[in-house]
Image (spheres, grey):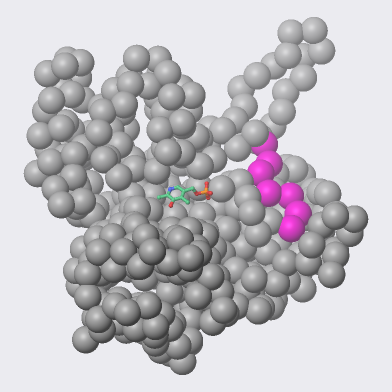
């Protein structure tokens, strides 16, 4: 079946249990699906845009209220929607990073943080991990190293609460406390937290909280949120000061880092339509972890299979090493490494990279208990069918 021309209908999440780490938190709610059809046209949220002509001030639909709700949801003072977490990083880097400035990221930072710094000419230094956990001690010594090397502290620190590789939790609150002793503003990267578990920006002490709409807030891509404190809002959401030379035009309250307006149709409306459910679902994080643990235990019961993520798990994204189990099977199987993803596919499970049997990731977020049990059973059954020992 086709949508149009050569474009296939996509029904991965209707026809399968999807365990793709990056997709499960971004799947639209039914409310968002309906809303995006109505607001698919370009600039559709602009129907009722009135003075002072800025996205976050639109009253119909209630975009202004949504911005207040987002800030409250994250316990921050001011929020803006952005086209993806990465554009939030870029806005903050654009405000604080000048050519040659040292900026801290971590050994497990996402590449988009690297690009945001590079784009502004910053010089990156990484806080190393210990057993793939970023600690406050490591942050403190890295800040001191930067001090010695540059003669000044870093101008900004990017900190991922849970990283994309292991889904490990890092010492965000403690690291923020250390950074603030040096007056370093901290961007809390909640790409894998905002919208799936509770996040309290003030309690963490974060200067900036960034979330991804399409990764964790059941919203279309590209969407996200950048929230900040009242003090930092004046800097990162500064308005244009330009008066053009020949025509003498000025541009009111347009915010420079937001390029005036950001999400103008499906993305914003999708985020807004899903928001009531998103706000409610973060309270069920413990249940999500319980489902995740069920699957982790099943994998651990397959001899030779190791969980590379921290244990016990604090996130539903988990990294698995099956070099001594599924990868051993792959060496003699007629389908080679494809036997694994193909066996999963036969059971209606999608989202594992075809051919991957060595080190791979999966995410159980959003499953029912029955689906988690089914997934757990599928892993052990595939193992047993291929001569691996379970138990
Ligand atoms: C996915 C991800 C991003 C990028 O998010 P976008 O919303 O796609 O820009 C950034 N950081 C981390 C840790 C991620 O996992």
Work out which residue is located at the far right of the displayed protein and give it.
Answer: 5
Q: Inspect this view and state whether residue 214 appears.
A: yes
Q: Horizontal placement of 308 versus 356: left or right?
A: left
Where does the magenta region start and end? 260-266
The residue lying at 32 percent from left, 32 percent from top is 156
Prevailing secondary structure of the magenta residues: loop
Residue 283 is a magenta residue: no
In this view, the residue in front, 127 or 22, is 22
The reply to whether the magenta stretch includes residue 264 is yes
- Position of residue 332 in the picture relative to residue 221 (left or right): left
The image position of residue 143, as x and y in percent, is 16, 31
Residue 279, above or below 174: below
Q: In which quarter of the image is residue 39?
A: bottom right
Residue at the image position 82 percent from the left and 12 percent from the top:
247
**Can you say which quadrant of the picture contains the C terminus?**
bottom left
Tell me: residue 331, above or below residue 229. below
Q: Position of residue 26 (x, y in %)?
A: 56, 64
Residue drawn at x 56%, y 58% is 213
Q: Which of 274 and 166 is in front in this view?
A: 166
């Amino acid at each position: 079946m086709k949508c149009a021309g050569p474009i296939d209908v996509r029904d991965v999440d209707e026809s399968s249990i999807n365990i793709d780490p990056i997709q499960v938190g971004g799947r639209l709610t039914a409310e968002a699906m309906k809303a995006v059809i109505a607001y698919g046209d370009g600039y559709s949220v602009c129907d009722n845009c009135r003075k002072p002509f800025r996205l976050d001030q639109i009253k119909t639909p209630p975009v202004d209220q949504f911005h207040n709700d987002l800030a409250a949801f994250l316990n921050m003072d001011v929020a803006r929607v952005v086209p993806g977490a990465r554009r939030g990083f870029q806005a903050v880097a654009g405000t604080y990073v000048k050519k040659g400035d040292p900026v801290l990221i971590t050994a497990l930072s996402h590449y988009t943080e690297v690009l945001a710094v590079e784009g502004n000419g910053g010089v990156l230094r990484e806080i190393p991990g210990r057993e793939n956990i970023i600690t406050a001690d490591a942050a403190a010594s890295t800040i001191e190293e930067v001090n010695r090397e540059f003669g000044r502290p870093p101008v900004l620190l990017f900190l991922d609460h849970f990283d994309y590789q292991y889904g490990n939790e890092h010492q965000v609150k403690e690291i923020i406390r250390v950074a603030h002793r040096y007056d370093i503003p901290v961007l809390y990267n909640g790409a894998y937290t905002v919208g799936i578990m509770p996040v309290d920006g003030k309690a963490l002490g974060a200067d900036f909280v960034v979330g991804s709409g399409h990764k964790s807030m059941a919203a279309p891509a590209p969407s996200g949120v950048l929230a900040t404190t009242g003090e930092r809002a004046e800097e990162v959401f500064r308005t244009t000061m330009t008066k053009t030379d020949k025509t003498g035009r000025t541009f009111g309250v347009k915010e420079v880092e937001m390029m005036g307006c950001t999400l103008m149709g499906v993305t914003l409306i999708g985020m807004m339509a899903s928001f009531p459910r998103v706000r409610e679902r973060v309270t069920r994080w413990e249940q999500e972890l319980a489902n995740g643990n069920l699957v982790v235990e099943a994998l651990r019961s397959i001899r030779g299979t190791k969980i590379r993520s921290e244990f016990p798990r604090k996130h539903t994204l988990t990294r698995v090493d099956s070099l001594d189990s599924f990868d051993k099977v792959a060496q003699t199987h007629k389908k080679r490494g494809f036997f694994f993803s193909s066996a999963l596919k036969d059971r209606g499970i999608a989202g594992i990279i075809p051919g991957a049997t060595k080190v791979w990731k999966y995410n159980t977020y959003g499953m029912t208990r029955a689906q988690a049990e089914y997934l757990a059973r599928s892993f052990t059954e595939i193992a047993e069918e291929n001569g691996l020992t379970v138990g």
